[in-house]
Image (cartoon, rainbow, N blue to C red):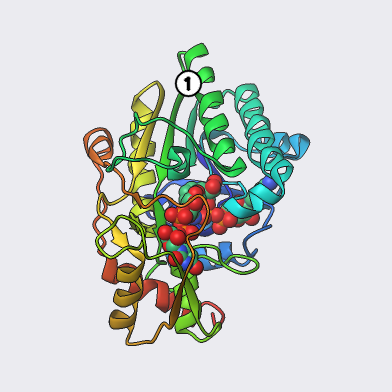
Amino acid sequence: MSILVTGGAGYIGSHVVVELLNKGEKVVILDNFCNSERSTADRIRQITNKNVLDYLVDITDARAVDRIFALHGFECVIHFAALKAVGESVQNPFAYYHNNVAGMLVLLKAMQKYNVKQLVFSSSATVYGIQDSNPIYETADRSAISPYGQTKIMCENIISDLAKADPKFSAISLRYFNPVGAHSSYLIGENPKGAPNNLMPIIANVATKKTQKMSVYGNDYDTFDGTCIRDYIHVVDLAVGHIHALEYIRCHKGMTSVNLGTGSGVSVLQAIETFESVNDVRVPYDVIDRRKGDSAVLVANVDKAKHILNWQAKIDFNTMCRDQYGWATRCNKV
Ligand code: NAD
Ligand code: WQD
């Protein structure tokens, strides 16, 4: 039986597909390519030497999704397909609720109809909103402030209710902290349409001179150097975490949520300095005002992932910087 990966052409999804194929799993990708390239499946084939089917389908299109389920006997679904830009979700909340929540309902309906009982869901540290104490446990209040964050909380709630109602259902919500880096082949990586929103691709754009300078959002936080601290995790570590999550839901019913991070924090200035020294580049910046909605510190407690998934991140921050730059310098040439 095969695994359906929605959003499998995207940044995290493509890395997970590589790990799944390397494990000998059969994979079907469903993506509307609104934030990825159709050529991703070819790149995945190049990396793995394995075949993968990819369908151009929108997750909110119930008839098209039904057709894919009718064609394949899926054992499990890994659901990445979603819009993910926090600021954009504030400007256009409807698109976020429609794509992320209505899309999830379409998927769950097809899963029910075709008796597919296993789900890995891409959630986010954004569900924690602003937290006073770190590291953050999975039991912390979920208080997301953006519509994007709200869609992740809503999806988690829907999945949890379905799991309570159906004793055969097994699901895991993976709350990613800050995924960065790229596959060491530099054939896949983050390829957003439009300007990047996240720190590491922004640093890479300055380092490769796509933009001249970047802004550091505030240096008056209550942290050791005044800039915000985040838990950056290499996307390949994150992808391996999904393989462990899949093994877990194959033998545990019910629904649970697990943080995927490293458990260590890096400040914005540390990120810039490390990127410069690892890659021997310059990243000029100005310090400007704080960005609305930023927490000073967001670092995962990773005990649950170690304990129930038998997984922990291995790749260090230097390698994250090397691979982010490697991808940035090669992604338009392959
Ligand atoms: P991405 O945009 O690279 O990948 C998402 C993929 O889903 C893209 O290929 C896109 O084309 C596809 N997609 C979007 N809407 C779709 C729809 N309606 N129908 C079919 N396909 C659709 O993003 P990513 O960084 O790989 O994120 C994957 C998941 O992880 C998302 O659910 C995101 O919310 C979550 N997440 C991401 C981060 C991050 O920082 N990258 C952090 C936490 C959680
Ligand atoms: C990291 C740090 C900024 C850009 C976001 C989403 C979260 C999740 C991961 C999807 C912050 C600072 C940034 C810049 C800067 N995505 N920064 N200058 O905000 O921790 O999390 O991505 O689920 O939901 O909110 O990540 O990369 O935007 O910012 O100083 O130009 O870098 O203030 O402290 P964030 P980020």
Residue at screen point 61% across, 28% down: 108
Q: Nearer the viewer, residue 289 or 19?
A: 289
Residue 304 in percent (x, y) is at: 26, 35
**SS type, badge 1:** loop
User: Position of 150 compared to 98: left or right?
Assistant: left
The quadrant of the rendering that contains the C terminus is bottom right
Give how far across and how far down residue 1 sits, in percent.
Answer: 50, 37
Q: Is mark 1 within 8 Å of ligand 1?
A: no
In the image, taking residue 31 as reference, residue 277 lies left or right, namely: left
Is 280 on the left-hand or right-hand side of 30?
A: left
Instruction: Say if 266 sits above or below 86 in the image.
Output: below
Q: Is residue 187 visible in the rendered structure shown here? A: no
Which residue is found at the position 61% from the left and 22% from the top? 112
> What residue is shown at x 25% (from left), y 64% (from top)?
316
Quarter of image, res 231 = bottom left
Crowding at mark 1 (Cα within 10 Å: few <14, some 14-19, many 20+): many
Q: Residue at x 49, y 72 (%)?
A: 202
Is there any visible trace of residue 266 in the rendered image?
A: yes
Q: Is residue 109 above or below residue 17?
A: above
Q: Is residue 187 above or below residue 250?
A: below
Q: Nearer the viewer, residue 177 or 135?
A: 135
Q: Amino acid at mark 1?
A: Phe
Comparing 56 with 79, the one in front is 79
Pinpoint residue 300: horizontal percent, then vertical percent: 31, 45
Where residue 96 sits, quadrant-wise, is top right
Mark 1 highlights which residue?
169
Q: Position of residue 101 (x, y in %)?
A: 64, 35
Is 112 above or below relative to 243?
Answer: above
Viewer-proximal residue among 187 and 36: 36
